Image (cartoon, rainbow, N blue to C red):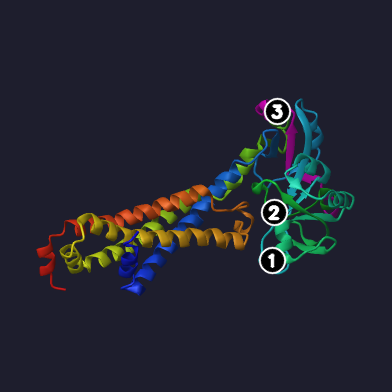
Amino acid sequence: MKYFPLVLANLGRHKIRTILTIASVTLALFLFASLRTVVTTLHANSQFGSARRLVTLNATGLVFPLPMAYANKIRAIPGVQSVSWANWFGGRYGDGKQFFAQFAVDAESYLAMYPEITIPEDQKQAFLHERSAAIIGRRLVDRYGWKVGQDVTLQGTIFPGDWTFTIRGVYTPTAAAIGDDALIFHHEYFDERLGHAGIAGWFYVQISDPGAAATVAKAIDDQFRNSSAATKTGTEQAFQAGFATMLGNVSLLMGTIGTAVVFAILLVTANAMMMSARERTSEVAVMKTIGFSDRTLFGLVLSEAGVIAGVGALLGLGAAKAFYRAINFNGFGFLPGFHITTGTFVMGAGIALLLMLASGLVPAVRAARLPIVQALRRVE
């Protein structure tokens, strides 16, 4: 510790170079934390799902609806406790440049099936008893300044026309994967506006025994196998994982891009740190002459690399944590629960440690082993 002022003095000789080197480490680890968190958030969301909830889709694809008449038939299958349904709406608000999800749901059964969606009881009752009412996530309140009792109009895209809803409640999810930026309204109102089309985008099926999930799912699909709208039923977790699959192999893409960018920046950073050490060859010889031991010189050179890597890591990882928390980032609705995990911090610290060793170990060994006479002969 007594040599720490000397380490800082050496780093201060070329202030601009030191600052730019630290900035490079900061940028590299900020990018690493950001890209890594995309991967961890997708993974965490794909693992969400109750063991007692199944999802029934049209076997052709998610965008193809199912007849509402399927609800009663599914409900009659042994092992099924309750059934709910939903439709993706896809409306635009304002200039349409900001995205948020909207769902038409069978309100009473949906809220009963999803205790993870918490809402004050008075707001819940107001929502349930008004056909054109809607509830919204807390994030939409922060983004648009909406209030309970306010009318909000969406321009339909899949289902044309102006759709006006009265906000009757604000929900807060207890599970990050659900997201807090959706508008949820009554499927009855949706069906009424469409002229009683009798369609559902998908069905939520709650079962009494989680161990019977595969049996119940097969029974549902077998019942509609030869119909005009065959079904595909799976666990809620598989349904969530399907959304991640629809985005492509994002994990591989983020990992590849992140590794390439971080590696390139760290190479530049390591070169700058090694160049700084090479410039002080004669100084190292003088320090040896006045009594500095090989071990001390080794520690001094490695400490300089450690300070640069450590400060850069602290700034980069800390900035990522603070920035995404400040803007309440959620990947425009596709990455609910986006936050920098402890594992990402640990990996970032590991990268900083490897950078310190890669950039400082060779110059430190060289300084420790450098013959005094040879060093003093060097012409600067």
Residue nearer the viewer, 31 or 223: 31
Residue 260 in sight here: yes
Q: SS of the residue at dot 1? A: loop
Question: In the rendered structure, which amino acid carries the disc numbered 2?
Answer: Asp
How many other residues sit within 10 Å of disc 2, few (<14), some (14-19) or many (≥20)? many
Residue 183 percent coordinates (x, y): 75, 55
Question: In the rendered structure, which amino acid carries the disc numbered 1?
Answer: Gly
Residue 212 percent coordinates (x, y): 68, 26
Left or right: 17 as drawn, with respect to 289: right
Question: In the rendered structure, which amino acid carries the disc numbered 3?
Answer: Val
Which residue is found at the position 79% from the left and 37% from the top?
A: 71
Q: Which mark is first along the chain, 3 or 2?
A: 2
Q: Which mark is first along the chain, 2 or 1?
A: 1
The answer to which quarter of the image holds residue 231 is: top right
Q: Is residue 368 above or below residue 290?
A: above
How many other residues sit within 10 Å of disc 3, few (<14), some (14-19) or many (≥20)? many
Disc sitting over residue 96 in the figure: 1
Q: Nearer the viewer, mark 1 or mark 2?
A: 2
Q: Nearer the viewer, mark 2 or mark 3?
A: 2
How many other residues sit within 10 Å of disc 1, few (<14), some (14-19) or many (≥20)? few
The answer to which quarter of the image holds residue 283 is: bottom left
Residue 153 percent coordinates (x, y): 79, 64
Q: For the N terminus, give its image quadrant.
A: bottom left
Q: For the C terminus, give its image quadrant.
A: bottom left
**Magenta region, residue range:** 191-217
Q: Which residue is mark 3?
A: 216
The question of residue 193 being in magenta is answered with yes
Left or right: 68 as drawn, with respect to 50: right
Q: Which residue is mark 2?
A: 180
Which residue is found at the position 61% from the left and 54% from the top?
A: 334
How far apart are the two marked residues, 2 and 3, measured between alpha carbons?
A: 31 Å
Q: SS of the residue at dot 2? A: loop
